[in-house]
Image (spheres, grey):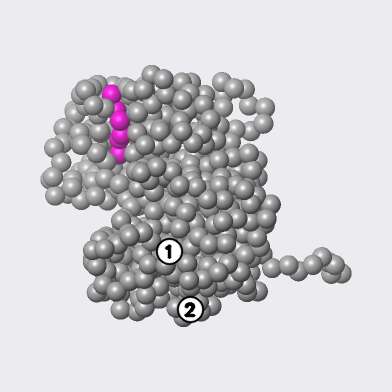
Amino acid sequence: MKSTMQNTQLLIRDLIKHGEFIYADKKVFTVSPDGVAEATFFQIAKRAEQLAAALSKLGVKKGDRVASFMWNNQAHMEAYIAIPCMGAVLHTLNIRLFPEQLSYIINHADDQVIIVDNTLAPLLAKVRDQIPNVKHIIVHGPEGTGVLGDTLDYETLLAAEKPGFVWPDLDENEAAIMCYTSGTTGNPKGVVYSHRSTWLHSMASTSANSIGLSERDRCLLIVPMFHVNAWGCAYTAFMAGVELIMPQMLLQGEPIVKMIEDLKPTVSLGVPTIWNDVLRVANEKPDVDLSSLRYLLAGGSAVPRVLIETYRDKYNIDIIQGWGMTETSPLAAVSIPPFGTPKDQEIDWRVKAGRIVAGVRMRITAEDGAVLPNDGKTVGEFEISGPWITGSYFGVEDPEKFRDGWLRTGDIGTIDAYGYLVISDRTKDVIKSGGEWISSVELEGALMGHPAVFEAAVIAVPDEKWQERPMACVVLRPGMSATPAELQTYLAEHVAKWWLPERWTFIESVPKTSVGKFDKKVLRSQYGDNALEVTTLG
């Protein structure tokens, strides 16, 4: 027996039309050093139609890749709408990649057009001679330097067109957006999201059992729009009527605190290093007002327990951890405590990576592929499947990343009987000492609970007796001090004795990847080159 339901295609076009109609007066705020510009959802949707018309005149056809090299701003949102809705593919370029990685992914994706913010033109100019297939470069904002050669002006192109571009009918499984991994090992790999996967991921983001975005919210979007579609929030905004605050290049603690005070977001999305810096500024400002926020969403790396506790106790703000990756669109798990959890026990759930979101399946496996029990104790690699999980990479064969239709995430940890994940490590970062695993993530979280520690990264280093041992790389807070012996004694109160690092080094800052995660491969390289001053405790 077959269903009698209509077989309507799930297209980004219709998601945008819904927001343009139902939430026409909702706004996007773009913050710059000169002030705040604002536009309604209706205005942005109409400008997106003008952009689509302009791109069509430039020869952009169905399936062509159009890249964005932009900050979080209104024009980037217009590109988010116009490009996939017209049947082309939006390729968001990471503005923090090395030039050789940037040219590689532009050429690998075969981008035909690039839209670039004027302030980023010098970065793109470094690879202009290495991307011969790019036919047009469109510059958003005044650009009089000529560093990119012949270019087109964004506003001039839009001004020549009228709203009313007719979005075509498409197959929901066709490509809509491309995003490349950050390339921490080897070349970045492309992940292609469909209209269908984007729609379903947006719906998941509105669930109260995930991050619960709704028309009651105004979101300060700190996570870059080139990083997994701003964690999906840009499209969820039009689906659910969520207003957006776009911070562009103003990503430091001071301007972020000012945005919170002036524009009153209810939620904000960013990596833990951002929230650590915001906390630093807030603690230095006695009359700081963060009261508009109902939660902060943190992802990309584990959130230290002390950070969650401080925001809760001092500012009455919940930090929700989200777990995912480029390959998972990214929403896969969210750390919301189970209903009925006593208030004083909620923190024990919030420090976990999250609970599996409806729509995806997860399992843990041994090295030989055997599926392990979800008992909260057995450690293995997380594997995941679902309608917004990639099944392959664009133009690259990587069979080692997939097993029986499941994506191998490279994250190591446990799943308990309630579906909560605890991340122990990445497979490339795991510390195996004497045949037993030590969690660098747990060591880092414990270390960052010390009042003198601003950041801490723990890496595996060779050891004659145990094969590998942990080494702690510590960034102290300004004006504060601590010795390796003091930190080791503090750590002994929180972790097993055999986990305690013997090797310690103090550094000015922890190296970060292009998306703000700790870049441990740099620290391992520095250690191998004897570039770190290391203290060894007996």
Q: Decide which of 62, 460 is in the foreground and name it.
A: 62
Callout 2: helix, strand or loop?
Answer: helix
Crowd band around label 1 with a 10 angstrom C-alpha radius: few (<14), some (14–19), many (20+) = some
Quadrant where the C terminus sits is: top left
Q: Decide which of 407, 90 is in the foreground and name it.
A: 90
Q: Circle 1 is placed at which residue position?
A: 155
Give the amino acid type for the residue marked by disc 2 in the picture.
Lys
Q: Which residues are magenta?
A: 452-457
| Left or right of 259 in this view: 292 | right
For residue 118, above or below residue 218: below
Looking at the image, the residue that sits furthest to the right is 1
| Left or right of 449 in this view: 294 | right
Say whether disc 2 or disc 1 marks the residue closer to the N-terminus: 2
Give the amino acid type for the residue marked by disc 1 in the picture.
Glu
Residue 155 visible at all = yes
| Left or right of 236 in this view: 503 | left
Is residue 419 magenta-colored? no
Estimate the x, y position of residue 189 in percent, counting from the top left.
Answer: 40, 65
Estimate the x, y position of residue 360 in percent, counting from the top left.
Answer: 61, 54
The majority secondary structure of the magenta stretch comes to strand
Q: Nearer the viewer, mark 2 or mark 1?
A: 1
Q: Circle 2 is placed at which residue position?
A: 57
* Residue plotted at (34% across, 43% down): 33
Tell me, yes or no, whether the two marked residues, 2 and 1, touch with CB atoms within 8 Å.
no
For residue 183, above or below residue 333: below
Measure how far apart labels 2 and 1 are at the Cα level: 15 Å
Is residue 456 magenta-colored? yes
Callout 1: helix, strand or loop?
Answer: helix
Quadrant where the N terminus sits is: bottom right
